[in-house]
Image (tube, grey):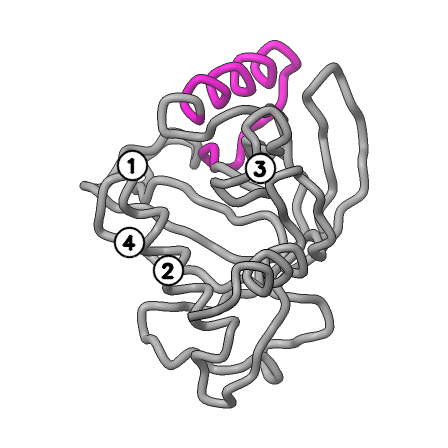
């Protein structure tokens, strides 16, 4: 059994603690505008490892995180370990409704997609190959993203509540939506709720 102090040091070095201290690499972006707790950001292209989980929201978090963490901590053909980055993204798997804009979507059963942003410096050719065929590596192009930031607990209800606030603000400010909303989490569950950084993201034109 590991020494408790060793475990705590390990958690600290991953970039997150109960006190909300972060040192993990974050997906790169530039801030275009800001209004209260809503920002418009320009994100650079990134590589992501993503997986779809057949489970409810609560169970999908643990399943997806374990699967993706296994990949970056050596569960790949090359047996390479990679640094944890932020944020961890999660969204309901949905399908576009025919003849409508991409944002008008409907959920497909009980499926959730979780994604880890890959550390900078890798390309599709140099990124380790996952051993788990449920993990897909994707190149995500540069995009403009509307972001609402909030603290406290993160669950399906709070994501829906904050997504609605962001969507209403975007409608009032005449933004064209290019995606459904997704959750972005920057801290593990053991971080004190009032210190957590949670966000809702929506791609915009």
Based on the picture, tell me whether residue 161 belongs to the magenta stretch. Answer: yes
> How packed is label 4: few (under 14 Cα within 10 Å), some, or many (20 or more)?
many
Please say if 43 is above or below 99.
below
User: The residue tagged with tag 2: helix, strand or loop?
Assistant: strand
Q: Residue at x 71, y 57 (%)?
A: 25
Foreground tag (1 vs 3): 3
> How packed is label 1: few (under 14 Cα within 10 Å), some, or many (20 or more)?
few
Q: Could you tell me residue 44's position as x and y percent? A: 72, 54
Q: Residue at x 71, y 27 (%)?
A: 39
Quadrant containing the N terminus is bottom left
* C-alpha distance separating marks 4 and 3: 23 Å
- The magenta span reads 159-182
> Which mark is on residue 53?
4
Q: Are marks 2 and 4 in contact (CB under 8 Å)?
A: yes
* C-alpha distance separating marks 2 and 4: 6 Å
User: The residue tagged with tag 1: helix, strand or loop?
Assistant: loop
Please say if 161 is above or below 80.
above
> How packed is label 3: few (under 14 Cα within 10 Å), some, or many (20 or more)?
many
Foreground tag (1 vs 2): 2
Q: What residue did someone put label 2 on?
A: 51
Residue 195 lies in what quarter of the image? top right
> How packed is label 2: few (under 14 Cα within 10 Å), some, or many (20 or more)?
many
Based on the picture, tell me whether residue 50 belongs to the magenta stretch. Answer: no
Q: Earlier in the sequence, mark 4 or mark 3?
A: 4
* C-alpha distance separating marks 1 and 4: 25 Å
* C-alpha distance separating marks 3 and 2: 20 Å
Q: What residue did someone put label 1 on?
A: 98
Foreground tag (4 vs 3): 4
Q: Earlier in the sequence, mark 3 or mark 2?
A: 2
> Which mark is on residue 88?
none
Q: Earlier in the sequence, mark 1 or mark 3?
A: 1
């Amino acid at each position: 059994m590991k020494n408790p102090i060793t475990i705590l040091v390990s958690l600290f070095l991953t970039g997150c603690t109960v006190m909300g201290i972060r040192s993990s690499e974050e997906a790169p972006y530039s801030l275009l505008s800001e209004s209260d707790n809503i920002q418009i950001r320009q994100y650079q292209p990134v590589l992501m490892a993503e997986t779809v989980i057949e489970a409810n929201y609560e169970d999908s978090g643990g399943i997806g995180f374990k699967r993706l963490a296994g990949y970056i901590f050596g569960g790949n053909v090359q047996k390479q370990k990679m640094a944890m980055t932020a944020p961890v993204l999660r969204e309901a798997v949905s399908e576009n409704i025919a003849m409508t804009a991409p944002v008008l979507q409907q959920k497909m059963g009980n499926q959730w997609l979780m994604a880890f942003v890959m550390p900078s410096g890798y390309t599709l050719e140099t990124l380790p190959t996952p051993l788990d065929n449920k993990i897909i590596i994707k190149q995500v192009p540069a995009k403009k993203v509307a972001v609402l930031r909030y603290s406290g607990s993160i669950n399906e209800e709070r994501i829906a509540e904050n997504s609605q606030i962001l969507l209403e603000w975007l409608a009032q400010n005449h933004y064209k939506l290019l995606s459904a909303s997704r959750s972005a989490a920057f801290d593990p569950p053991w971080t004190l709720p009032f210190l957590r950084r949670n966000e809702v993201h929506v791609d915009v034109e």
